[in-house]
């Protein structure tokens, strides 16, 4: 299955930078050396098993935009699965930007009416931290209004190549393309139970974007009955209160993608390749290892009696099952 | 009357709490915007390099303390500082670091200031090591970087020669906040201050031999500076992987902390135990974090926390790691005890408790 993904936006808005971060494992610090993209750069990225992303990075200089919207209109806008439109939050000239955006939506509606649309407010790091929520809300409203005016429903994200926000947005974009991710969640949850894990996360191998996660497991040893949690009045807290306490950091998926990608990059500088990682930390035990040819799995365990060796055996045993799942169930429609 | 006099004589600005510890002082000098404050922030305040862009200029000497194997006091000076205006004898400092911005085409002025300081420091305190960081090398490609670096060192040495001061030894290092070079350069500076360094190095050499490790570092976890390494040469790739690995582990930890499941992992210390000797035979050994990063070509990079502040990082064959975990752990325990003892001795010698 092939999905065409259009990456559009004004010149210098950061399209090629984000592509090189997510798909080519380049560090953010080197993006300043990228030249402007001439015309369209096409990439085929084998994402998962049979799912191939056909990425069209469309150079954003006016001359190119004008041809996309005129002579190349059909070529560019037909068979599009996803349109990602990138806006530089630091840009001064916005009317021109918005006018091209409108024209693109117009063409998309005609040639690929079913395409999903994602809008990235990029270079958020240039906005002071305290101003970001307000700025994002304001620009989101503006862009959502603009899209619905064109009869298109769009999802807006604030992103920056310098933090995990880029991984969050791209994980959501990819998620929209993967059919039946729910099946994966079900199997990951079964696997988590088998490992006595709190959580299991499946990543795509090259991009380290999150494909699926198990539902959060509640470790029995930390349940209120064992006295681990005592309310203010000395009484035991209710399970739901305990579950709130058990909640992990809300940004952990995208932060993990970002951290592992950075580590993979430093391995490559050593002309080495990242293979596996295991950690016994005060907070948790974790094993990150290859699951299938295209995926990595991260198993998070809080039970201190579970050894990393046991987790590794469980992963090995689950491999063929997931390989099978990936090729049959998930990607044939 | 007396208190007023005392206030006037006090140093202009300080965030140093007066403690009895005898700290090793590091003097950071250089022109305005050469990158002194950035270096301090990136290494010791966990600031991301691209965030240093917004730093305000330093207007008076700022003193920062940092505790690792040895207690440090880092003096960040404004660019206008001269040997006369410093107001503190050079012999007070354990090391002097001069930062020169390689990307500034007007470095003539910086070189003049550098030479002034080098001569003044040498005349007053010839033993104090004088380090030069040729900084911001990230702005150039590799060839151009080297050429500029050579040109600057040549200019400085020419100036010293013209003043008949060529016997002054300066140590030049190329650095950038954007990569591992600043970590490597500053690590080497700190190692000059650790009196017990040979003992720690011995422990690491013994560890390498016993655990079949090809390389071992003792890192300060928070700053990611290495305070010692074994006798084999430091390879830039391995060093930067170690830095990134520690950074990754530190950032990863809070992400998967659960308010109830995490404390239940580590047996909470019972209150009565504080009255008992800390090494009661029944007490379980304290939990110490560890990690192992396997690389595809058959090596594993291990991480073992040695003290609350320090960690051992070692590169060993994956086969050895897999087959001899027990032996490895045994050697780690041995090293950990040795390091702890050296840290205690250092601290006592400096009047700490
Ligand atoms: N501050 C900041 N700069 C960024 C970010 N993303 C990209 N940049 C910078 O923006 C500049 C332009 O990036 P490119 O990726 O080449 O832009 P592009 O959209 O591909 O431009 P065209 O190919 O001409 O359409 C580079 O110098 C990047 O380093 C970001 O999140 N924050
Ligand atoms: N390219 C580059 N810029 C740097 C580096 N270190 C610092 N800078 C920048 O240099 C400027 C001045 O830094 P600052 O620390 O305030 O200089 P100070 O006056 O010497 O304390 C800031 O804009 C930093 O972002 C570096 O390694 N590379
Ligand atoms: Mg481009």
Image (spheres, coloured by chain):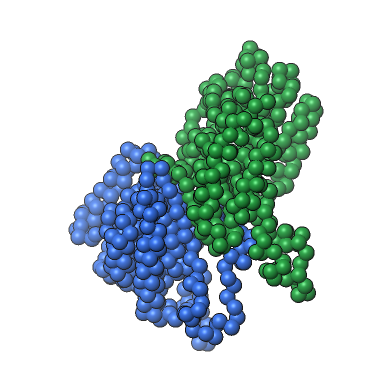
Chain colours: A green, B blue
Residue at the image point whose x is 44% and y is 81% from the top: B353
Above or below, B306 against A66 in this view is below
Report how many numbered discs are placed on residues in the image: 0
Q: Residue furthest bottom?
A: B1
Q: In the rendered view, does B259 fall on the left or right side of A310?
A: right
Residue at the image point whose x is 54% and y is 52% from the top: A311
Whether residue A36 is visible: yes
Q: Quadrant of residue B36?
A: bottom left
Residue B221 is situated, as x and y percent measured from the top left of the image, at 46, 61
Residue at the image point whose x is 58% and y is 27% from the top: A50
Residue A53 is situated, as x and y percent measured from the top left of the image, at 58, 27
Q: In the rendered view, does A273 fall on the left or right side of A317?
A: left
Residue A56 is situated, as x and y percent measured from the top left of the image, at 58, 24
Residue A182 is situated, as x and y percent measured from the top left of the image, at 69, 39
Q: Quadrant of residue B264?
A: bottom right
Closer to us: A255 or A216: A216
Q: In the rendered view, does B73 fall on the left or right side of A101?
A: left
Whether residue A17 is visible: no
Residue at the image point whose x is 56% and y is 43% from the top: A318
Closer to us: B189 or B56: B189
Above or below, A60 against A241 in this view is above
């Amino acid at each position: 299955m092939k999905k065409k993904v259009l990456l559009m936006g004004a010149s210098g808005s950061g399209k090629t930078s984000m592509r090189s971060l997510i798909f080519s494992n380049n560090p953010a610090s080197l993006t300043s050396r990228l030249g402007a993209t001439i015309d369209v750069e096409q990439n085929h990225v084998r994402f998962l098993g049979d799912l191939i992303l056909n990425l069209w990075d469309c150079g954003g200089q006016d001359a190119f935009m004008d041809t996309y919207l005129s002579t190349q209109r059909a070529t560019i806008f037909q068979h599009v699965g996803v349109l990602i439109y990138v806006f530089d939050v630091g840009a001064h000239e916005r009317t021109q930007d918005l006018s091209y955006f409108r024209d693109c939506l117009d063409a998309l509606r005609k040639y690929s009416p079913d395409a999903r649309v994602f809008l990235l407010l990029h270079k958020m790091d240039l906005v002071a931290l305290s101003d970001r929520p307000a700025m994002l809300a304001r620009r989101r409203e503006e862009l959502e209004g603009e899209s619905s005016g064109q009869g298109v429903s769009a999802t807006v994200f604030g992103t920056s190549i310098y933090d995990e926000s880029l991984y969050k947005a791209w994980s959501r974009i990819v998620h929209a393309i993967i059919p039946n991710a729910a099946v994966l969640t079900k199997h990951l949850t079964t696997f988590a139970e088998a490992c006595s894990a709190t959580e299991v996360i499946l990543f795509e191998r090259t991009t380290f974007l999150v494909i699926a996660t198990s539902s959060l497991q509640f470790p029995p040893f930390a349940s209120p009955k064992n006295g681990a949690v005592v309310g203010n009045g000395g009484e035991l807290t209710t399970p739901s209160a305990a579950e709130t306490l058990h909640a992990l950091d809300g940004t952990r998926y995208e932060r993990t993608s970002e951290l592992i990608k950075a580590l993979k990059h430093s391995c490559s500088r050593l002309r080495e390749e990242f293979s596996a990682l295991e950690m016994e930390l005060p907070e948790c035990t974790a094993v990150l290892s290859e699951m299938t040819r295209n995926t990595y799995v991260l198993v998070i365990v809080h039970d201190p009696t579970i050894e990393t060796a046991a987790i590794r055996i469980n992963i090995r045993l689950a491999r063929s099952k997931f390989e099978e799942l990936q090729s049959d169930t998930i990607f044939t429609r | 009357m007396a208190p007023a006099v005392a206030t006037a004589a006090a140093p202009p600005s300080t965030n140093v709490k007066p403690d009895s510890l005898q700290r090793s002082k590091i003097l950071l000098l250089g022109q305005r915007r050469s990158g002194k404050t950035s270096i301090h922030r990136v290494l010791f305040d966990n600031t991301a390099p691209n965030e240093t862009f917004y730093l305000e200029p330093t207007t008076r000497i700022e003193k920062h303390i940092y505790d690792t194997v040895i207690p440090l006091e880092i003096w960040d000076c404004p660019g206008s500082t001269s040997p006369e205006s410093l107001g503190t004898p050079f012999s007070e400092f354990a090391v002097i670091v001069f930062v020169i911005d390689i990307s500034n085409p007007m470095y003539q002025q910086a070189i003049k200031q550098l030479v002034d300081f080098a001569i003044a420091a040498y005349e007053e305190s010839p033993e104090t090591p004088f380090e030069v960081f040729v900084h911001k090398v990230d702005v150039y490609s590799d060839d151009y970087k080297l050429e500029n670096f050579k040109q600057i060192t040549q200019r400085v040495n020419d100036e010293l020669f013209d003043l008949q001061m060529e016997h002054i030894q300066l140590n030049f290092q190329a650095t950038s906040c954007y990569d591992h070079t600043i970590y490597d350069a500053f690590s080497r500076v700190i190692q000059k201050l650790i009196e017990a360094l040979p003992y720690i190095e011995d422990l690491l050499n013994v560890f390498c031999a016993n655990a079949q490790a090809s390389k071992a570092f003792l890192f300060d976890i928070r700053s990611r500076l290495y305070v010692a390494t074994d006798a084999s040469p430091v390879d830039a790739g391995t060093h930067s992987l170690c830095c990134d690995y520690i950074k990754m582990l530190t950032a990863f930890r809070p992400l998967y902390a659960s308010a109830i499941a995490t404390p239940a992992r580590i047996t909470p210390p019972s209150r009565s135990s504080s009255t008992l000797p800390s090494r009661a035979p029944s007490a379980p050994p304290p939990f110490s974090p560890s990690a192992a990063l396997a690389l595809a070509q058959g090596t594993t990079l291990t991480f073992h926390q040695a003290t609350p502040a320090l960690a051992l990082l070692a590169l060993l064959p994956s086969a050895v790691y897999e087959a001899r975990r027990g032996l490895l752990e045994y050697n780690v325990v041995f090293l950990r005890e040795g390091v702890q003892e050296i840290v205690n001795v250092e601290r006592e010698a400096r009047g700490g408790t």
